[in-house]
Amino acid sequence: MTMDELTTALAVDLDRAFPDLVKDLGPRLYWGLRRMCGDHQEAEDLTQETFIRAYKALGDFDRQRFDDLRLAPWVWTIALNLGRNHIRDRSRRPLFVEINDHGVEDAELPDERAWDSRFAALNRNQRTAVVLRHVVGLGIGEISETTGRPEGTVKADIHRGLDRLREMMEHEA
Amino acid sequence: MNIEQQLEGLAGPLPEGITEGVALGTGIADGYDYYDSPVGEVVVTFNPNGVSSLGLASDDFEGYFNHRHGRPLIRAEAPSAWSGRIPSAIEAGTPGTLPVDLRSVTDFQARILRIATTIPKGEVRPYGWLAREAARPGAARAVGSTMARNPIPLIIPCHRVVRSDGTIGAYSLGGPHVKWELLTHEGADPVHLEDLAEHQVRVQGNKSTHIFCNPTCRAIRRSKPENVVPFKSGSAAEASGYRACELCRP
């Protein structure tokens, strides 16, 4: 399903189409957040909370707002806003806790710790831009829309961030 | 592999549990958990609006829930903000401050169900009493069908609502014998109530106070047995110079 088809489906029947939105955007959302915050639990909380906020917002959308909606950047805008507040309030817990406790370990990818420390060494703008561009796969225009930074600045953030990562990896070798 | 390609490989599948967490948090699905009750283990379902249904754990509960509410069920803990109130609401037979989600019934039915929550433990009221309390005195039959559709039995105590003739009547949670069991457990004597119904005793008056009550009202049950006078209706009691009890509003 393309993003346009998904947007149309959401406008027609939100409850029926919303699980498809989670299926389509969820993996990149979780892993992007995981790269940005370096923590499984926090990325999981933020992913859930982002989707819950998105669902509530979409419930109030009229036809015009659905027509103008660009799903991925819009969802990421919610996620980044939540992420900023989340740092201020780490004590809050999600509303629901599922009883099956799926291990944290199965969410680990190879070389996990090394990447966490490399990303931690970037400044926040560089980290956000590199992750959104190359881990999540957003375009420069979409990142600019999400972060509110001009496209030229986004490009420079990505460029400097990648340089810094390459440098670190050369040092490690 | 260049760095861009390596970065692309840094995303994997969505970890398990997130999809379910989103479904529960949005209310697209309801969560369910098991609780003890006076009639055995029950399943309670919930969503961000509150508790949405209760059923016997032994029934095909999931199939019933999907059919009636049109939402899937996920095994989960109730929201911590009010999960602790579920066992006490089951024991008390009234929601108290526990939020309940009555979107599965009409506004009128929700109003009737909320009135049913005011019937004290150990007492019963006939359909017509709820209809009058709802300012719809002619709606006794609608009250009956509302009780049959009560999505949250035990917590919304439809077991304290009896038929207009005073007989105990049907019960959606496992049948009439469960209703008898519950009323006995709560101290309302169903054998005695059926006996009164058979003798067409709808209200009882107190000779010394000249007040008449529903037969299970705590005021009339405190009266000396020799003072209790049976009546076939409230108007018959009034014709004999009795006035209605302000506690049970017969």
Image (spheres, coloured by chain):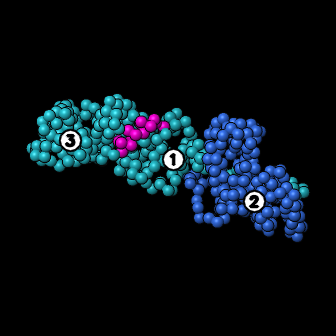
Circles 1, 3 touching at the beta carbon (< 8 Å):
no
Q: Amino acid at mark 2?
A: Arg
Choose top left, top right, bottom left or bottom right for residue B210.
Answer: top left
Q: Which residue shows up at 39% across the image and 43% down it? A: B114
Residue at the far bottom in the pictured view: A171
* Residue annotated with mark 1: B49
Identify the secondary structure beneath mark 2.
helix
Give a yes or no on whether discs 2 and 1 share a subunit.
Answer: no
Q: Which colour denotes chain A?
A: blue
The magenta stretch spans residue A108: no
Q: Amino acid at mark 1?
A: Asn
Q: Amino acid at mark 3?
A: Ala
Left or right? Give the position of A11 relative to A115: left
- To which chain does the residue with label 2 belong? A
- To which chain does the residue with label 1 belong? B
Marker disc for residue B244:
3
C-alpha gap between disc 2 and disc 3: 71 Å
Q: Which colour denotes chain B?
A: cyan
Choose top left, top right, bottom left or bottom right for residue A149.
Answer: bottom right
Residue A168 appears anywhere in the view: yes
**Dominant secondary-structure state across the stretch colored magenta:** helix
